[in-house]
Amino acid sequence: MCAALMDGRAWTVGELGNYAGLARSTASEHVDALVAHGIVRDIRQGRHRYIRLAGEDVAHVIECLGALASSDLPTPHSLIASRANTNLREGRTCYQHLAGKLGVSLVEQLQDRDYIDSQWQVTRRGRRLFTQWGVPITMLTTGTPCMDSTERRFHLGGPFGTGLCKALLHREWVARIGRTRAVRLTATGREALIDAGLAPGSPATIDDDDHRDLASL
């Protein structure tokens, strides 16, 4: 359930139960425990009950726990499950940051090209680029390293990581794959990175709901 909520969106109890393969009553018990311990927030609108992570600090802890784990979360042995896991490793949102191979590769290239310095702060050169990309100036102040649970390397966190992820999604340079937190780099996004002097690798092709998606840098 916590892994599902890492996409930053609100889920209903029923949706979380379906995702985890649990009966609604059992899912409700687990959600009540998460609410009681301050891990998630319970938001009620009329008859609907929505669940969200309590904040970015909780998401950071969950991602760090994933990095410490010796293996991925177990999933049913099926083609669909295998494809979903592959998509998440290639690119996903870690709460409101870009993660997986896509996120890690992007931030490493931004550092190599002097858009971000060794302290994870935006350089003068980077400020010009990111404002052109639509990242709010107020979110360019703080970038932090966030250990990626699958790559065991850092992706970009903090307010700047959030602003960059939102800008790329808004411009449709990065797009979500179905209803999961997996994301892909689009053809337009690939062109934008090339224009910035960044070097996406050969596109990988992944089928998802009859789509053929670019999934990695």
Image (cartoon, helix red, strand yellow):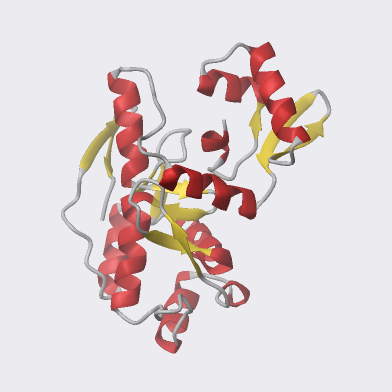
Q: In this rendered view, identify the residue nearer to me: 202 or 188.
A: 202
Quadrant for the C terminus, please: bottom left
Please name whichever residue, 40 or 69, is drawn nearer the observer in this view of the structure. Answer: 69
Q: What residue sits 74% from the left and 26% below the top?
A: 32
The residue lying furthest to the left in this view is: 202
Query: Residue 109 location in percent, x, y?
Result: 29, 70
* Left or right of residue 114, residue 166 in this image: right
Location of the N terminus by quadrant is top right
Q: Quick check: 179 left or right of 28?
A: left
Seen as rendered, the residue at the extreme bottom is 124
Q: Measured along the vertical axis of the image, is residue 127 above or below residue 67? A: below
**Residue 136 can be seen, yes or no:** yes
Q: Is any atom of residue 185 visible in this view?
A: no
| Residue 159 rendering spot, x and y as whole percentages | 58, 66
Residue 67 as seen in the image, left or right of residue 102? right
Residue positioned most to the right: 46
Q: Is residue 184 left or right of residue 170?
A: left
> Horizontal and vertical percent for residue 193?
30, 67
Q: Quadrant of residue 139?
A: bottom right
Which residue is at a point 33% across and 38% down the rendered structure image?
87
Q: Which residue appears at 54% of the width and 44% of the height?
A: 62
Q: Position of residue 190 (x, y in %)?
A: 28, 60
Residue 173, quarter of picture:
bottom left
Image point (30%, 61%), residue name:
105
